[in-house]
């Protein structure tokens, strides 16, 4: 039985084989499995907890490869659907040494856009303890309806709900629509993790404190902003701080945020099982959780690709001890 269930996109990242060139100048691409919620599901499994994934891929070579890969990684896939209506989504990724990325989605439509409400199984969701999703599945009506159904079931079942708002300009019709959709579910979630580069678009302000307060007013219990190698901010109704990151030799940063989220959820699950709600966590406990997530995110930067770079439990523990 899955302890943490992730819903959303599972796709193929085609990562440029050469750093610091545009996509049109890239001499070739390396196939890497990806998709933020799927990355998180694999990250959770590698960190020693049971995860499950809800989504759709094409009944094609890439889709079957992805399903098999998740199964090999220990992710429960009974609610990952192979469909004939569309092909598995591809994303071409250009990587740069300043950590900026070019991303072009081949998704017109992609199989992940066909997740439907009737594919969301109440019994499957309610046996878990945490439900995690991102904002990409809210863009289109069909997967958006499926996501909202899953969110409702999770809330009714008493699951902790985690949310990762993503802004990909190639997918959203406008920044204004993205902000509206992202905020439409904010009052239904417990944990929100936002990357530094997306913070101002999501909150409308540069200042962390002001933006975090606006999110907390929606009923969110924990707000986290990941800032790459610098570290991460966190805030709850009681505590707020910045936790410094770890210095590593960066190969590529595609899966870093997802490794961070996976580690964050694994540590929150541990607290949850110990009878603690987020509001019960002390300042030191929260700092420890964020430091652990920073370590996982840093390790994910040392390898190319998203899922291939996600660290194991022993990787993170050894890294923290050595630091």
Image: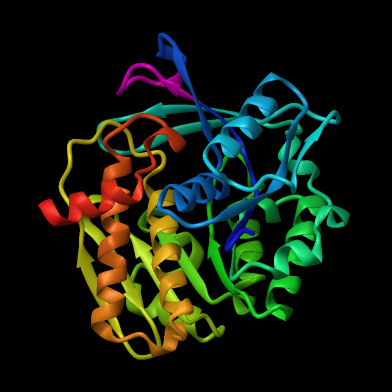
Q: Position of residue 132 (x, y in %)?
A: 58, 61
Residue 84 seen in the figure: yes
The extreme left residue here reads 322
Q: Position of residue 32 (x, y in %)?
A: 49, 27
Question: Which residue does the image show at 62% across and 75% down from the upper left?
Answer: 159
Observer-nearest residue: 237 or 173? Answer: 237
Q: Position of residue 3 (x, y in %)?
A: 57, 63
The answer to if 19 sits in the magenta stretch is yes
Question: Which residue does the image show at 74% across and 31% down from the upper left?
Answer: 108
The answer to if 160 sits in the magenta stretch is no
The extreme front residue here reads 1
Q: What segment carries the magenta color?
A: 14-23
From what the image shows, is residue 185 above or below residue 61?
below
Image quarter of residue 190: bottom right
Q: Which SS type dominates the magenta stretch?
A: loop
In-image side of 119 versus 65 (left or right) = right
Observer-nearest residue: 33 or 183? Answer: 33
Q: Which of the image's four quarters has the N terminus?
A: bottom right
Residue 151 seen in the figure: no
The extreme right residue here reads 118
Question: Which residue does the image show at 41% across and 31% down from the upper left?
Answer: 305
Question: Which residue does the image show at 82% across and 51% down from the upper left?
Answer: 142
Observer-nearest residue: 276 or 98? Answer: 276
Q: Position of residue 35 (x, y in %)?
A: 56, 41
Image quarter of residue 178: bottom right
In-image side of 242 versus 140 (left or right) = left
From what the image shows, is residue 291 above or below residue 103?
below
Image quarter of residue 267: bottom left
Q: Which of the image's four quarters has the C terminus?
A: bottom left
In-image side of 97 versus 75 (left or right) = left
Q: How many marks?
A: 0
């Amino acid at each position: 039985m899955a302890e943490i269930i992730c819903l959303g996109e599972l796709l193929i990242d085609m990562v440029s084989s050469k750093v610091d060139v545009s996509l049109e100048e890239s001499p070739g691409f390396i196939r890497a499995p990806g998709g933020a919620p799927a990355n998180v599901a694999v990250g959770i499994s590698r960190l020693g907890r049971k995860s499950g994934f809800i989504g759709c891929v094409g009944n094609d070579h890439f889709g079957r490869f992805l399903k098999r890969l998740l199964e090999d990684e220990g992710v429960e896939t009974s609610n990952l659907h192979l469909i004939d209506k569309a092909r598995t989504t591809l994303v071409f990724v250009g990587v740069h040494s300043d950590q900026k990325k070019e991303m072009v989605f081949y998704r017109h439509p992609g199989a992940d856009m066909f997740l439907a409400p009737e594919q969301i199984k109440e019994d499957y969701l309610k046996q878990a303890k945490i439900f995690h999703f991102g904002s990409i599945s809210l863009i289109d009506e069909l997967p958006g309806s499926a996501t909202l159904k899953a969110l409702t079931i999770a809330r009714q079942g008493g699951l902790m709900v985690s949310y990762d708002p993503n802004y990909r300009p190639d997918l959203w019709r406008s920044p204004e629509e993205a902000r509206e959709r992202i905020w439409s579910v904010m009052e239904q979630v417990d944990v929100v993790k936002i990357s530094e580069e997306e913070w101002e678009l999501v909150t409308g302000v540069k200042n962390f404190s002001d933006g975090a307060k606006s999110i907390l007013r929606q009923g969110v219990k924990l707000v986290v902003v990941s800032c790459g190698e610098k570290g991460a901010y966190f805030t709850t109704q009681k505590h707020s701080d910045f936790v410094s990151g770890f210095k590593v030799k960066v190969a590529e940063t595609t899966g870093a945020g997802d490794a961070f989220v996976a580690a964050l959820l694994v540590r929150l699950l541990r607290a949850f099982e110990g009878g603690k709600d987020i509001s019960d966590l002390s300042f030191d406990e929260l700092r420890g959780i964020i430091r652990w997530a920073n370590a996982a995110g840093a390790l994910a930067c040392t390898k190319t690709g998203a899922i291939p770079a996600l660290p194991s439990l022993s990787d993170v523990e050894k890294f923290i001890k050595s630091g």
